[in-house]
């Protein structure tokens, strides 16, 4: 019984630590500071107005506030807002897809993967393909990391077709006095 309690406590601690790790970055993506300008640089840009999307290709570097996203390719999907006269007045991002060598950084938080999907309406972020997240020295890894912003809930899953499990490496607080 004591062993079950210890395992339960470890699971609870791991969940809490991961939620804190992943929330740091994701909160920045959807924070109230979302009115801050988004600066994107890339080797090439393709605007697809009929598809309400813009594709950035090659050495993509996107910044908003203290969040930086880097990848080989980023597609921004948006919806057109119309004013009272029916003319297009502004655009609002509803989905963001980053592919290949994805890296998301905020302060000491780093998330990586082969792909990142952000769904504005559902307020959900998904890192896939060898997904990893670090905060300081602490790290969690799996095939997929999904974070639900409003629920402050995360799920880390491993590829069921391959051997291996979800992994976390946690370092004790070295600043504590003994």
Image: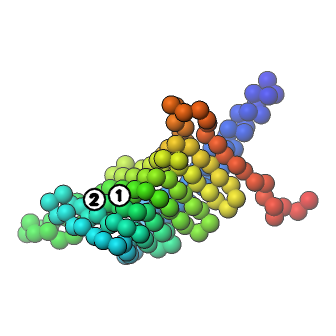
- Measured Cα–Cα span from mark 1 to mark 2: 6 Å
The C terminus lies in which quarter of the figure?
A: bottom right
From the top left corner, tell me how far across and down residue 27 is, in percent.
49, 60
Using the image as rendered, state which of residue 110 and residue 149 is in the foreground: 110
Residue at x 17% of width, y 64% of height: 49
Would residue 151 be visible to someone looking at this image?
no
Is residue 68 shown left or right of residue 39? right
Residue at x 24% of width, y 61% of height: 53
Quarter of the image where one finds residue 9: top right
Q: Is residue 117 above or below residue 31?
A: above
Q: Which residue is mark 2?
A: 77
Q: Is residue 148 above or below residue 87?
A: above
The N terminus lies in which quarter of the figure?
A: top right
The residue carrying pointer 1 sits among few (fewer than 14), some (14 to 19) or many (20 or more) residues within 10 Å by Cα, namely: some
**Disc 1 element:** strand
- The label number, if any, that marks residue 127 in the structure image: none
Residue at x 32% of width, y 66% of height: 56
From the top left corner, tell me how far across and down residue 35 is, in percent.
37, 72
Mark with earlier residue (1, 2):
2
Q: Which residue is mark 1?
A: 96
Using the image as rendered, state which of residue 177 and residue 99 is in the foreground: 99
Residue situated furthest top in the rendering: 1
Q: Are marks 1 and 2 in contact (CB under 8 Å)?
A: yes
Is residue 56 shown left or right of residue 177? left
Would residue 30 be visible to someone looking at this image?
yes
From the top left corner, tell me how far across and down residue 79 is, in percent.
22, 60
From the top left corner, tell me how far across and down residue 142 is, in percent.
56, 43
Residue situated furthest left in the rendering: 85
Residue at x 68% of width, y 38% of height: 11
């Amino acid at each position: 019984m004591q062993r079950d309690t210890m395992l339960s406590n470890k699971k609870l601690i791991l969940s809490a630590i991961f939620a804190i790790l992943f929330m740091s970055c994701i909160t920045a993506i959807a924070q109230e500071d979302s009115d801050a300008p988004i600066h994107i640089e890339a080797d090439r840009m393709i605007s697809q107005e009929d598809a309400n999307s813009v594709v950035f290709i090659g050495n993509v570097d996107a910044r908003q506030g203290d969040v930086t996203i880097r990848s080989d390719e980023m597609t921004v999907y948006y919806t057109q807002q119309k004013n009272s006269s029916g003319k297009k007045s502004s655009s609002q991002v509803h989905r963001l897809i980053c592919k290949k060598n994805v890296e998301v950084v905020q302060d000491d938080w780093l998330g990586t993967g082969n792909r990142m999907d952000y769904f504005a309406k559902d307020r959900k972020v998904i890192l896939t393909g060898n997904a990893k997240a670090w905060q300081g020295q602490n790290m969690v890894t799996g095939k997929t990391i999904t974070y639900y912003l409003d629920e402050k809930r995360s799920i880390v899953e491993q590829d069921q077709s391959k051997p291996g499990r979800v992994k976390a490496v946690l370092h004790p607080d070295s600043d504590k006095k003994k």
